[in-house]
Image (cartoon, helix red, strand yellow):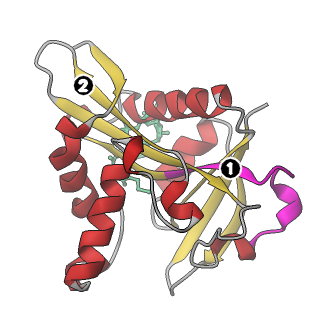
Amino acid sequence: MTYSIRQADMDDYYFVVEIDLLDEGVEGENPYLTASFEEQSEYLGRLAQFLDSSLNTGETELYTCPKYALICEDVETKERIGLVMFLFRDMNDPTFQHLGIYDKFDRSMFPTDGKVCEIFQLWVAPDHRRKGIASELMKKAERVARDSGIQMIYTHTESVNDHVVELCDKLGYEVIRKGTLWDETVRVSQIKHLG
Ligand SMILES: CC(C)(COP(=O)(O)OP(=O)(O)OC[C@H]1O[C@@H](n2cnc3c(N)ncnc32)[C@H](O)[C@@H]1OP(=O)(O)O)[C@@H](O)C(=O)NCCC(=O)NCCS
């Protein structure tokens, strides 16, 4: 099977929503399911921003920051077999907020320009796992970030996901923290300098 990686567009919207709501690799109940209608609509709107940058409007950095979704697909069948989503956050923006996550880290670990690429979603179809697809998606995200002048990439995963920590470790990420972030779940935070 030959696959290619491309930027997602609005034709991929239902796929992206489906994978995001699947919430695989995350323990406990998906908060989306118990959210109010308004919160659900806002969340779905934000997912659409990953596919169409003209939708990147809003009052805070989280809404205006650049967002990307890359799809891995089977060249022959066009089946979508992988997804990575990421955002270029700006810690120096006065409207920057992220559930207090970044307050947990020593700010000196991050670039002084405040710019960081944050991985939001990583998924590969079960039948295609352990073939290096997630690693290729992560590397492509790194290239997009580096080409945009971003010097650091950040990700976290629940500490039960040892294999995801290992995946990032193999890509050169370093663990900077293991502990709770915004709820009771212990998560491992990893960064990589994009020198
Ligand atoms: C995690 C996930 C994205 C990995 O995708 P993948 O394409 O299989 O990953 P790769 O093939 O690039 O794996 C690279 C390395 O990571 C580690 N790894 C990945 N999945 C692993 C697993 N299930 N068990 C053990 N190690 C694993 C291995 O070291 C692997 O190298 P190896 O195959 O040479 O041993 C995929 O299993 C998935 O979609 N899971 C559900 C969603 C999820 O958990 N996302 C992350 C949430 S934060």
Q: Would you identify the image quadrant in which residue 20 lies? A: bottom left
Let me know if residue 30 appears in the view.
Answer: no
Q: Residues within 10 Å of mark 2 (few under 14, many from 20)?
A: some
Q: Tell which of 24 and 95 is nearer to you.
A: 95
Q: Quadrant of ligand 1?
A: top left
Q: Identify which residue is drawn at 33% across, 42% down.
A: 51
Q: Quadrant of the C terminus?
A: top right
The image's mark for residue 116 is 1
Q: In the image, is 101 to the left or to the right of 111?
A: left
**Residue 66 to residue 81: above or below:** below
Q: Identify which residue is drawn at 73% across, 34% down.
A: 194
Q: Identify which residue is drawn at 35% across, 24% down.
A: 6
Q: Quadrant of the N terminus?
A: top left
Q: Nearer the viewer, mark 1 or mark 2?
A: 1
Q: Amino acid at mark 2?
A: Glu
Q: Would you identify the image quadrant in which residue 150 lies? A: top right
Classify mark 1: helix, strand or loop.
strand
Let me know if residue 192 appears in the view.
Answer: yes
Q: Position of residue 18 (x, y in %)?
A: 18, 54
Sequence-wise first label, 1 or 2 = 2
Q: Which span of residues is magenta-colored?
A: 105-119
The image's mark for residue 152 is none
Q: Identify which residue is drawn at 67% across, 30% down.
A: 146
Q: Position of residue 137 (x, y in %)?
A: 44, 32
Classify mark 2: helix, strand or loop.
strand
The reply to whether dot 1 and dot 2 touch (C-beta < 8 Å) is no
Label tally: 2
The image's mark for residue 73 is 2
Q: Is residue 69 magenta?
A: no
